[in-house]
């Protein structure tokens, strides 16, 4: 798809209610009129290919032109991916069944491929388990995932046929989340996004990270207004804790846990795991890895060819006036001149 076609599709699928909410927040924080903000957003889209969420998360209303140029936008992101990642190999990241086979030793959990497994293999996989997760091979943002309580599924033949007919072709053992993350939200396996960038010399750099924590009792991550924060190697939060609209939280609204007290001991190990995984697929240089912290240490959940730059450059996360594009340029150095943005 051309960049123009991709931008047109993005414009047609704008969530106007969500856009209105963002404008309300910008209006409240800046004192600028709403018509002015809408016109400024349109200008940013025409000049930089910035969507309304790019505009909001970058706090464009308060930035000068040079500062705005340091931010990734929807248009620039598409071009970055085109330069850094090879489409021929993206199936390894896009198809969860292919991904699990390729990165099996990073999963640390059993899984079953229903493209290949028959009913007898299905029964063997379920034996002794109380809960499994069924996933569609292609999907993101928590969509195409469902939790299956096996005690409530008495007819295993019917379950087998239903999963196949609905396209849930990957079954995985449940990840038992570590106590440190459970204290934040025990209702879901919360997701730690780690973004890696491979330099031309083969070195893999951790660009940024963002922990996504559900606010409520949802059992699948990514389908609610989540909370986000960044982690340091020492296992402590090194940013503000924010939601999609830039509200800052001191405690988790569901559990009451104080974020300043959070310590997750395996963050450094998670970074090393993502570096090792990234070296396995050098053709995809810019990857977003989703990691979970289990009782036995960090495990990779999936890899994403589209790492999701938005929350990484949210102005409230670290109170910065420069964006993710500067971080990429700092790592690539002279090579950045080859990227046609």
Image: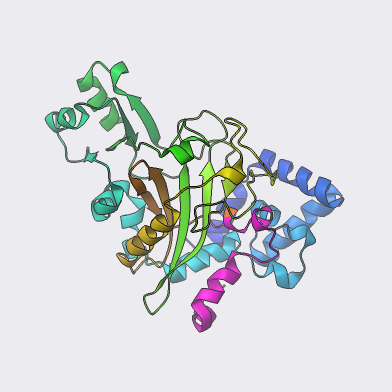
Asked whether 234 or 245 is in front, the reply is 234
Is residue 19 in view?
yes
Q: 261 or 250, which lies in front?
A: 261
Write the start and end of the magenta stretch as one range: 312-338
The percent coordinates of residue 245 (x first, y second) are 68, 44
Q: 64 or 203, which lies in front?
A: 203
The structure residue drawn at horizontal position 40% and vertical position 78%, both measured from the top left corner, is 200
* Position of residue 112 in the picture relative to residue 8 (left or right): left
The residue depicted at 38 percent of the width and 59 percent of the height is 274
Specify whether residue 335 is painted magenta. Answer: yes
Q: Position of residue 183 (x, y in %)?
A: 50, 35
Residue 122, image x, y percentages: 18, 31
Q: Residue furthest left?
A: 120
Q: Quadrant of residue 66?
A: bottom right
Q: Nearer the viewer, residue 90 or 245?
A: 245
Is residue 262 found left or right of 23 in the rendered image?
Answer: left
């Amino acid at each position: 798809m051309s960049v123009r076609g991709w931008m047109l599709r993005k414009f047609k699928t704008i969530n106007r209610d969500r856009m209105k909410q963002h404008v309300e927040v910008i209006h409240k924080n800046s004192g600028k009129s709403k018509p002015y903000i809408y016109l400024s957003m349109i200008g940013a889209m025409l000049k930089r290919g910035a969507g309304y969420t790019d505009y909001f998360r970058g706090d464009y209303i308060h930035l000068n032109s040079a500062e705005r140029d340091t931010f990734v936008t929807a248009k620039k992101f598409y071009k970055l991916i085109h330069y850094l990642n090879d489409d021929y190999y993206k199936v390894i990241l896009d198809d969860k069944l292919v991904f699990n086979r390729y990165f099996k030793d990073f999963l640390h959990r059993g899984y079953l491929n229903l493209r290949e497994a028959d009913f007898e293999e299905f029964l063997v996989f379920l034996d002794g388990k109380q809960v499994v997760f069924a996933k569609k091979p292609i999907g993101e943002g928590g969509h195409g995932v469902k939790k299956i309580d096996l005690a409530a599924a008495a007819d295993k033949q019917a379950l087998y046929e239903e999963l196949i007919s609905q396209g849930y072709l990957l079954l995985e053992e449940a990840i038992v989340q570590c106590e440190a993350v459970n204290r934040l939200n025990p209702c879901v396996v919360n997701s730690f996004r780690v973004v890696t960038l491979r330099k031309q010399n083969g070195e893999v750099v951790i660009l940024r990270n963002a922990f996504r924590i559900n606010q409520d009792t949802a059992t699948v991550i990514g389908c609610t207004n989540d909370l986000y924060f960044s982690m340091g190697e020492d296992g402590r939060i090194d940013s503000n804790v924010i939601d999609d609209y830039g509200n800052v939280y001191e405690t988790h609204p569901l559990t009451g846990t104080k974020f300043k007290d959070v310590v997750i001991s395996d963050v450094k190990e998670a970074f090393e795991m993502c570096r090792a995984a990234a070296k396995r697929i050098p053709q995809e240089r810019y990857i977003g890895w989703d990691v979970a912290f289990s009782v036995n240490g960090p495990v990779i959940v999936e890899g994403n060819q589209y790492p999701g730059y938005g929350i990484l450059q949210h102005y409230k996360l670290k109170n910065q006036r420069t964006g993710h594009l500067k971080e990429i340029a700092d790592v690539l150095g002279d090579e950045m001149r080859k990227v046609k943005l």
